[in-house]
Structure formats: structure tokens, C-alpha cells
Image (cartoon, rainbow, N blue to C red):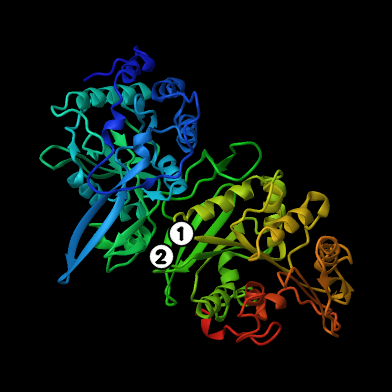
Amino acid sequence: MAIRCKATVLGWMIAFQLIGWFGAFQAMSGASFEKVDLPQRKPGEVSGGPVAEKVQTLERSKREEIIVTEILDGNVPDSWRRFVEVTVTRTNAGTVHRLTMAVAPDYLAVGTDADGWLTPLSPQAAERIADQLGCMLPTRRMVDDIYAAATVKLEPLAMTPGPEMTTVPAFAAHNELVRKQRATLAAGPRPGELVAGHKKDVVLTPRLATSSGKVAIYGWHRLNGQPIQSLYLGHTDAWVDYSHGIRLVRREMTLDGVKTTADAILADPAKAFLLSDEGVIASARYGLASLTTRTPGLGTGPTSYAAVGRVPPLGVVTTNGFGERSEVFTLEPGVRLLINQPANPDPSKPVRLLLFALPNGNTIEQTIGKKLAPGDDWHFDIQHIGAQTRWLRAADTNATWAIAYLEATNRAWPVWRRQNDPKDTRIREIVEQVKARFTGRKLSVVLTGHSGGGSFTFGYLNGVDAIPADVERIAFLDSNYPYDSAKGHADKLAAWLKGGTNRVLAVLAYHDSVALLNGKTFVSEAGGTWGRSHTMVKDLGERFALTKPEDEEWENYSGADGRIRFLLRKNLKKEILHTRQVEWNGFIHSMVLNTALENVGYGYFGERAYWKWIAE
């Protein structure tokens, strides 16, 4: 069927007002789950036809900015909001497993039950929506399972191939074909149906790990159960045509009566077969492309937006002998990101996500640390954040400790901010990107860093109206140089501390203004961390009652039932202790202050407690 692009999209869509066919297909293949967490449609919200008309002449990225915003603002059919249980049983080594997943009853649509538009999207736009809703795109095996469970199976309707197939008029024309097809069903539409067969799925596959910048598509099953489209990665991830559909699946699943996540299943070689016929998928997400998407709780006004920088699909995934896996990404402009976590995290445990901004002059690998071999750079042996994190994981097994190392590619966050983010909006967005990797998990966030990495933390404080409630700890490791009460830092920190009894502020510093380098001082009394720390103490002391236990070596300020802690080394020998504070168990100490683990099994400014956790 050729596409007549001279007709207007609105003309194609007017007929949708005559029949509410979206409401007819709220699936009944199992008990319904709770509705997805989207705002209710606003009075007077435009329906699918006008949205299609609005975006028909826009290039893809601008078009998808509008569509993603419409969906996340709740402009979806009411019938789509309630997901449906699909249960499959599979046998492995004589053991029968029963897996239940919550599946969207239809492909993603903009508009109302009476006027809905099944809109194709790029995988990155789809991933942003999925992440916001605690969902994922399906694998090839999941698409087959959903089709098998569907109570309404539609014959695929193909249109004439050509350049017009990637245009909005083609999307709307195919939408009209599907609408008419449904309207002619002999039994008529029935509430609660799971519908399949009318679109190809954008899917996840392990092949994406070695096919950067591609989209994977599969499905479009005929009525005999055979898909027209075998798994295909021949298009770039910018290719979007009329046949593509976005089916969302909840990440939270039930396996043999126990709650788990799709991420945990797909990352486990013994369980991946339940969801994938291609083996393990280490990271069940597409990389995020440049588009604007809603980020709740940021900025001003009722709805805020965040520009998301590009991340290569799935990152580069590696594992090591400590039972960890790491993913490396590149964010724009000029940021490297490595996320390290247990290879097989327990989905029942909360995630404690440490955002560690690197010190000036150091790479991620140097910050993680290793045992020095001949010829190695000395930077590999001065922080050992990797080993100290492993110590924390061993000491606290009640949470999944994940750490995100953030490196400015010019190796200086203060310089990066001046050149790339003078208004401190991009840092805020980077934090949201990292958090999105853990959508669907109970998450608490720790903001920390060493030296110039403190610039990242203060950039984040500048970029938010208020520190979010999911931030449970802020720790400065000789890194509070940019502190400035005139920028609202004291007010934001005080409001955050008063907002919850689980929130801790830890500041570790030393008397750097008396330290000598080649016989001379190199930091001013006010500008170093000693001076900045005392300014912080003064400002917070106006808002909290602070005590000051003191001895010959330390000034130790405490307040808010121990949730405010300043540990300031007096430096009687006038040494340079900038990295020693971290190396001598300082990172561990900053993470466990005001917990039952404080000073248990280690000593701050003592011998390394983490020797056995240092990698070769």
C-alpha cells in the first residue's frame, strides 16, 4: 500500500474520535498489575491526532523531545496504564521454573482511548520512558512469550517500502490501518485484552554490546506464530519506521514465587535462559541519546527538563576476580563514567550508589588503584577507592554498594565546569543519568569525591533547588574548596540535614595552609580546605548546635546527633597530607561515620585496612 503524503496527518486521525479502540485492549491474559506511575491527563490535553499533526514536519530528535514529554506528562490512553501478567514456565536440569512478568497491554501510544497514536520511537527515546517507569524493552524470547499469551493476535499489515516509511505521515497511515483492522474483529473489542502482531518490537540483545549505535528489531508475528522480522541489527539507532512498536515490560518480576528483577535474571548465567534465548545480557538497557526528557524534582516550575548526553549502548562491560562487573561510558561533553557493582546483586537489597568525582590529575583507573608493578605510575597507589569499596561491601552486607567514578576528560572538574557547564545544569543531568541505571531498585545516593572532585559536588548543589531526598550522605575528602555560603550552600545543606534523620555530612580536611612544599607554603589560609572547613563550621554553627572535642592532633566538630562531622587534622609537622587522608582509610571512614561500623576493623590515619582487597 503506497503512502499518500499529500494528505494531512490530522485527516488520517479524525476517524479515531468515532471509536475508542484503545480501551478495548486492556489485556486479560493474567491478573492486572497496578497502574504505571504517570500523572493523570490534564484537562484539555491534546489527543493523538493533534500531537501527530504537531510533530509531522520536525526532524527526529525534536519530534521525540515532544513525544517523550507528552508521555511522561501522562498523555497516554487510560487503558494502557494497567499492565498485565504474563506467566511462563521453563525447565532446566529437571527443575521447573515459573516466571511472571508485567507487560504493557499494547505498544506505547500518545493520546486517549478514543484517539491514540501508536508512535514509533528510537531506542534511546524509548529507554528514557522505560527508565522513568521502572520498565525495560523486551528480548526476542520475551516478544515470543508475549505473542503466545496475547488474546488478540493481529495479522501484520505491511506498507510499500521507501523513504516515506520513516515519516510521521507514514506512522499515522499505519495507525489508521491497524485501527480499521481492530474495528472489524468478528467478536468485537473486549476490555482487558493483550494485543500483539501489529508491530515489530525494538528489543534487547547481547549483540548490541558489539554493535554500537545500532537498533535491534524483531517480531511482527503472522497468525501462524512465525515472525516476519528475524532479529536484525542492520539499521542505526536513528532509524525509526512505521512498523516499529515500543512494548514496555516491568523490570520487577516474580520467579518461583520470589520477587526479583529482569536485570538480575539476565545477568545470571544460570537464569538468563528464562528471558533470553541468546544467553546473558549484562546490562538490559540501550544507551541514552541526546534528547530532552522530564526529570522530576529538578529546576523550577511544575515540570522540569534535563538534556541527556550520549552514552554508548550498554557500555563496555568487564568482570574481575572480586565478583564485580564494571561498565564504562562516555558522556558529553568530555566525561568518562565507570559504574562498578557486584556481578550478581541481590535484588531484594537496597542499592547504595556512591558518586565519586575524581581528583585533579587522576584517571578512573588510577583512582580505583592496583598493586604497583615496575613502571606503573605512582597515582595507582595513592587512593585505592576500589579496594576501600570492597572493604565496605564485605563489612556491610545489608546493601548493594555500587560506585560510579566520574572523570572529567581534562582531569580537572573545576576547569570542566568553567568550560562546559557554567550554569551547573549538566552536572545535575549527569547525576540523574547515573541514577537511571538503577531504576526499579530502592536507591540511596552518596555524593563524594577527593580534591577537585568537590567541584562536581558543589556544581550539583548549585544546579538543584534543593538536595533531593534520595541523597543520604555528602562527604568531602579534602575537597570543599568551592564552598560559598553566598551561593546558598549552607542553606541547602542545612535544609537537607533537617529533612531526614538518615542524612550525614562528613568533611575530612587538614591544615593545608601551613604545609610546606620545597620549604614554602602553597595554599592560603582562607582558600584551602582548612579555611573552607572553618567557614562551613561557622555557617552551620549558626543553624545547628556544634560541639568541638579537641586534642593535640584534631579538631573534631559534631552536631545534629552526630550527623554533622568535621574531622580536621592540625598538621603539626607541616606535612602534605592531601592524599594521605584518603589512603589511610579516609574513604572508608567518610562512608561509615555515624553508623555501627565507625572505627570497627580500621583506623582513620592508620595502616591500610584494605590490603587484601587491592587488585593486581
Residue type for callout 1: Arg
Count of residue discs: 2
Q: Residue at x 76, y 63 (%)?
A: 480
Residue type for callout 2: Pro
Instruction: Tell me: 520 left or right of 396.
Output: right
331 or 116: nearer the viewer: 116
Residue at mark 2: 347
31 or 106: nearer the viewer: 31
Q: Quadrant of the N terminus?
A: top left
The residue furthest top is 6
Instruction: Tell me: 49 left or right of 416.
Output: left
Q: Label 1's element? A: loop
Tags 2 and 1 touching, CB below 8 Å: yes
Residue at mark 1: 441
Examine the rendered structure and indicate whether residue 590 appears above or below residue 69: below
Q: Position of residue 78 (x, y in %)?
A: 38, 34
Asked if residue 175 can be seen in this view, the reply is yes
Q: Label 2's element? A: loop
Q: Position of residue 492 (x, y in %)?
A: 73, 54
